[in-house]
Amino acid sequence: MKTTRRTLLRTTAGLAVASPALVRAQAAWPSKPITIVVNFPAGGLTDGIARAFGQHVQQATGQQVIIDNKPGASGNIGAAQVARAPADGYTFLHSVSSTLVQNRVMFKTLGFDPDKDFTIVSGTSSGVLPVVVHKSVPVSNLKEFVEYAKANKVNFGSWALGSSAHVFAQGLNEKFGLKIEVVTYKGEAPMWQDMGAGQLQAAMGSPQAFNALLVKGEIKPIVAPSRVRAGKFPDLPTSAEQGFTDDMFTVRGWLALAAPAATPKPIVQKMSDLWVAAADSEPGKKMMDSFGLTEKPLNHEEVMKDYEVLKATIIPRIVALGIKPA
């Protein structure tokens, strides 16, 4: 078809008036404060990274970044709130990957659809989360812990229902016929409080969050349930190095910065770039070092690909464990 001046003007005019407000909003983003909902309490890894990286976003854009902690229901409450938020680039969710992956088979209802309601902006490695025991538990490795659990009552702390800690403990129960009781908390901070009080015999979590207990000698690490050893604990063997080679004993996942699914792609891409760059900022590097994190965050394209891998790997594993939806 021959393109005339009239048809060209009609076409370009149509594009211009399609959504002028949206075009202006994207070009000016951000033009007001950004809220990042953290669906766990203050004091843990998810909250710490959100605050440090959010500080970089604030410095880079000149707009205030507000961290809003909305814990509860293993992260579902905060996630549902963001799922219902306007998809304008001013409300994000910072969560753990289990909220979007494990929770779909851990709960009968979520209040949101992980795949339809969200797009993942970036993924930050959660690093190595060692398994530690209370000082009263006379073991120094995972094999000794299994033997101890066969003869003693063990309460194992988990920061959320269906978390990596939950899957790890349930895996031990299934594999070795144990009766470890998984105690679920609304985040790491209250879990470590109970560990310090001696109400838990074991737990798994981030080194920075349990460091105070470690310094006091209240706990001791027994295994790194990961593919590599923890930077903070180079002498602590991994599960595989201790002979526990089943996939369920090797934790894999990341912290997810997510946005409502309809958020304009240019905004998602810009926020992704800001979040990845935050790892190299002064507050970002300081926070990552305190948690022993060394891997750079995944950008939007990378994390969306890995999201599919996580779902294909972890969901069948939870189903196989027979954990009944709550």
Image (cartoon, rainbow, N blue to C red):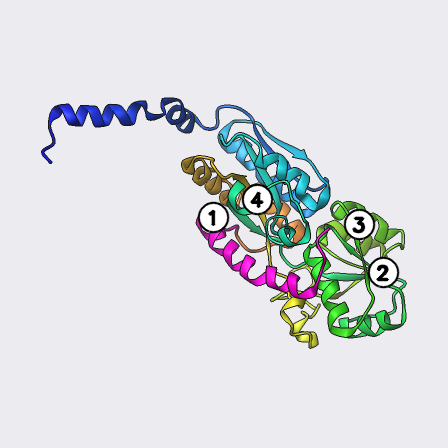
Name the amino acid type tagged 3: Met
Q: Are marks 4 and 2 in contact (CB under 8 Å)?
A: no
Name the amino acid type tagged 4: Asp
Where disc 4 sits, the SS reads loop
For label 2, the crowd category at 10 Å Cα-Cα, with few meaning under 14, some 14 to 19 and many 20 or more, is many
In the image as oriented, which residue stretches furthest toward the bottom?
243
Q: Is residue 57 above or below residue 307?
A: above
Spatial separation of the CA atoms under disc 2 and disc 1: 38 Å
Q: Are marks 3 and 1 in contact (CB under 8 Å)?
A: no
Spatial separation of the CA atoms under disc 4 and disc 2: 35 Å
Of the two numbered discs 3 and 2 on the same chain, state the one appearing first in sequence: 3
Residue indicated by mark 2:
201
Left or right of residue 198, residue 212 in this image: left
Of the two numbered discs 2 and 1 on the same chain, state the one appearing first in sequence: 2
Residue 175, horizontal then vertical, whole percent: 73, 73
Q: Which residues are magenta?
A: 297-326
Of the two numbered discs 4 and 2 on the same chain, state the one appearing first in sequence: 4
Q: Residue at x 64, y 60 (%)?
A: 231
Quadrant position of residue 258: top right
Residue indicated by mark 3:
191
Taking depth in this image into account, of 313 and 213 the one nearest to the observer is: 313
Name the amino acid type tagged 1: Asn
Where disc 2 sits, the SS reads loop
